[in-house]
Image (cartoon, rainbow, N blue to C red):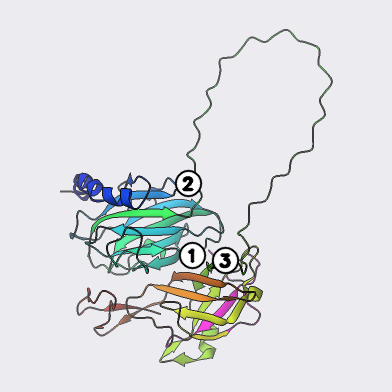
Amino acid sequence: MGTRIQKGLMGTFRSGLFASLLCVHGFAGAAPEVEPNDTQAQAHVLTITDSGATVSAMMGTGPGAMTTDLDLYSFDGKAGEVPSIMVVSDGTWDPLVALYDAAGNILDMNDDAFPMNPGSTSTNDSRIDRYRLTGAGRYYIAVTPIPRYLGINFRVQFSDMGQGGAYLLVVQGVSAQAPAPEPTPVPDPTPIPDPTPIPDPTPVPDPIPTPDPTPAPTPSSGGSDPWIVTIEVLNAHNDTLVLGKFKGKYAIPVAIMSAPGFDALTMIDESSLMFGATGNEKSLLRCKKKGKDVRVDKVRDGIKDLVCFFRPDLAGFEVGDVQAILRGNLVGGGTIEGSAALKIIEVSNRKEKNWHKRHNVDPRGKRHHPRSR
């Protein structure tokens, strides 16, 4: 039986399974997943309302069934928005969620959400909610089962199958996107009346200037919520080579992106920065004094960003980690927080007992394991 037919037969089961979640936890009514959605061109376009978007979906053909499925969704985001992307599973499988831009660059990725998602019954469920979008455009969400790690251009790093199951995809924090209006019907032509005297022309008022897009709010010392910053874990380059190695690994360069109303070079207390698996690791080595205009999607915006280097031996990354978290303070008071995907992946030649520390399982057995840096 084909995958599409099998997934179609699971529709009734899926809707009944999550009916209680939708009612109890206040999620908006779920729309069914649109299949096929395995490639960027086939991505299920999300309908974003004032309350966000919720999709009822199936990974693979059923709960516990082994699968190589990859579900892709798309939405239009604006600069400064911080989308909250949650995968609430039926508890039978371990989801991985990733956020991409239109060029296929992986922006952020998460395996296990902490604290747990609203409505989740499993600590394995995933969430992305610390990435600030840098520009307006089309963004993509990818969902797949562990241990099918994702890389650039939606490529799966390993061909292993994972267990599938039902899930809700909940997206919030993105502006509502109204559907395209219906075309206005063209009325029947009316007879041309006899010409009348042309009155004096009415003075044309000066045009009302169109306001610039509303910039992201400026972070301040007020409030207890952290200011979400956009970070990017950069590839190693000459600077890291000069800084030397720590337990055989080069320092990890991280860019903290500036934005309208937010100058990362002057507004961040560099000495307070912590970076690693949880964001509480005191791993800072040093920051560039003059900053650097880091390219985003191969384009420089002309604004210098703060680039800092962190010690890998203190960052606390374990085999299987897919996300890096940064925390720190603002110079005038207040805190910052941000996350991004780990993009440098090595392969361990030995079996790691702590491959998936939080799950207490070793899904890859005696085969090679991914190691993120």
Q: Does the CB distance between marks 1 and 3 fall below 8 Å?
A: no
Q: Is residue 339 magenta?
A: no
The residue under label 2 is 50
Q: Is 11 on the left-hand or right-hand side of 325?
A: left
The first of marks 2 and 1 along the sequence is: 2
How far from the left and from the top, in percent, is residue 322?
A: 37, 72
Q: Does the CB distance between marks 2 and 3 fall below 8 Å?
A: no
Q: Is 49 on the left-hand or right-hand side of 205?
A: left
Mark 2 lies on a secondary structure that is: loop
**Region of the chain picked out in magenta, as a range:** 287-315
Task: Count neighbours of disc 1 (C-alpha within 10 A) and say few if under 14, some if 14 to 19, many if 20 or more.
Answer: many
Task: Count neighbours of disc 3 (C-alpha within 10 A) and say few if under 14, some if 14 to 19, many if 20 or more.
Answer: few
The first of marks 2 and 3 along the sequence is: 2
Task: Give the quarter of the image for residue 158.
Answer: bottom left
Q: Nearer the viewer, mark 2 or mark 1?
A: 2
- What is the number of the mark on residue 131? 1
Q: Hey, what amino acid is under mark 3?
A: Gly
Mark 3 lies on a secondary structure that is: loop
Marks 2 and 1, how far apart in space?
20 Å
- Visible residue check, residue 234: no
- What is the number of the mark on residue 244? none
Q: Is residue 44 above or below residue 247?
A: above
Which of 221 and 126 lies nearest the eye of the viewer?
221
Q: Nearer the viewer, mark 1 or mark 3?
A: 3
Q: Hey, what amino acid is under mark 2?
A: Asp
- Can you name the residue that lies furthest to the right here? 200
Residue drawn at (20%, 77%) of the image: 365
